[in-house]
Image: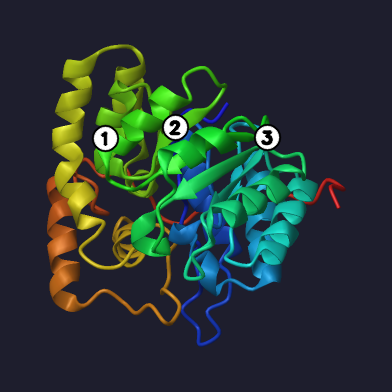
Amino acid sequence: MFEGVLPAIITPFSRNPAQSLNISGLVGNLEFLLAHGVDGVVPCGSTGESATLSFDEHEKVIEVTIDTVNGRVPVVAGTGSNNTAEAVRLTKAAKDLGADGVLVISPYYNKPNRAGLIKHYSKLADLDIPVIMYNVPGRTGQNLEPDLVAELAKNPNIVGIKEASGNISQISRILEATCDEDFLVISGDDNMTMPIMALGGAGVISVAANIAPKQMVAMSDAMRNGDFSTALKIHYGLSPLFRSMFIDTNPIPVKKAVELCGMAAGPVRLPLDELDQKKTEQLAAVLKTAGLLAGSKKSTGKKTVKVKPAKKKGRR
């Protein structure tokens, strides 16, 4: 269900002092992604600036995403927190709104012990919605070890892990340890998508797919079809773009890239700040070479579509 390319979507804001949600921009961005064949979407992840969204904004982004997608692809809502009670609240809300699953980051800063991690994820799984764990030690300060992942994978509602440790040996061990479970290992790094899928991974929760969904889907599809030469060609073609997404803290570069490609983005919220001029020029050069820059000959971007979000269908 959660295989292939699932963009971790940005959250577009207005450029007024209040930096309110740009709902029509969110809808337009989603329609762009769907038109280019993505296999799912992930609102309110770290790329969606979940850390600076209020509870009401968080739920609104999930609601608009679900209503806009309207069952065309799965919606996996980011509902993680380093406070288990907050993660429970967000997960319950996502379930009530109709999300197909949730993405839950390993608790950051407080570094729970093994028993605490098991209880945290198990408590969320008890809410009876598919849970994808998210291991990103560079952000959380703590690694989800393969033996712990294998233990949690035995829970039928813990269906996968987004792996962004960058450690291919660890990822291989997780795949080996969970091969007898109905469990997905999903890349959390665009540049690791191909090697992880070669080991048996299910796909990628992608930053770059916000601006290059067609190419990311083509690479993923090639891997799923065993066409490694085509996948490798696309991988190397996209590699400069992958690197450019991390010339500054995510999601600063991708949000600027979305804007440069003519779609809705707006500013990042403090404590993040805008990409500086030098890095913006560097990013624009990469986008131009890739044919993604708004107005370039091969551009896959488009101007923001002004579409009213679908009405609620009585999910809450």
Q: Position of residue 293 (x, y in %)?
A: 23, 53
Q: Residues within 10 Å of mark 2 (few under 14, many from 20)?
A: many
Q: Is residue 159 above or below residue 189?
A: above
Amino acid at dot 2: Val
The numbered mark at residue 157 is 3
Amino acid at dot 3: Asn
Q: Nearer the viewer, mark 2 or mark 1?
A: 1
* CB within 8 Å, label 1 to label 3: no
> 72 or 166, which is in the foreground?
166
Q: Earlier in the sequence, mark 2 or mark 1?
A: 1
Q: Is residue 142 above or below residue 167?
A: below
Q: Which residue is mark 1?
A: 169
> 279 or 31, which is in the foreground?
279
Q: Is residue 218 above or below residue 301?
A: above
The numbered mark at residue 30 is none
- Of all residues, the one furthest to the bottom in this rendering is 17
The numbered mark at residue 185 is 2
Report whether 155 appears left or right of 92.
left
Q: CA distance from mark 2 to mark 1?
A: 13 Å
Q: Earlier in the sequence, mark 1 or mark 3?
A: 3
Who's the residue at 56% across and 67% down the image? 22
Residue 72 appears in the picture as rendered: yes
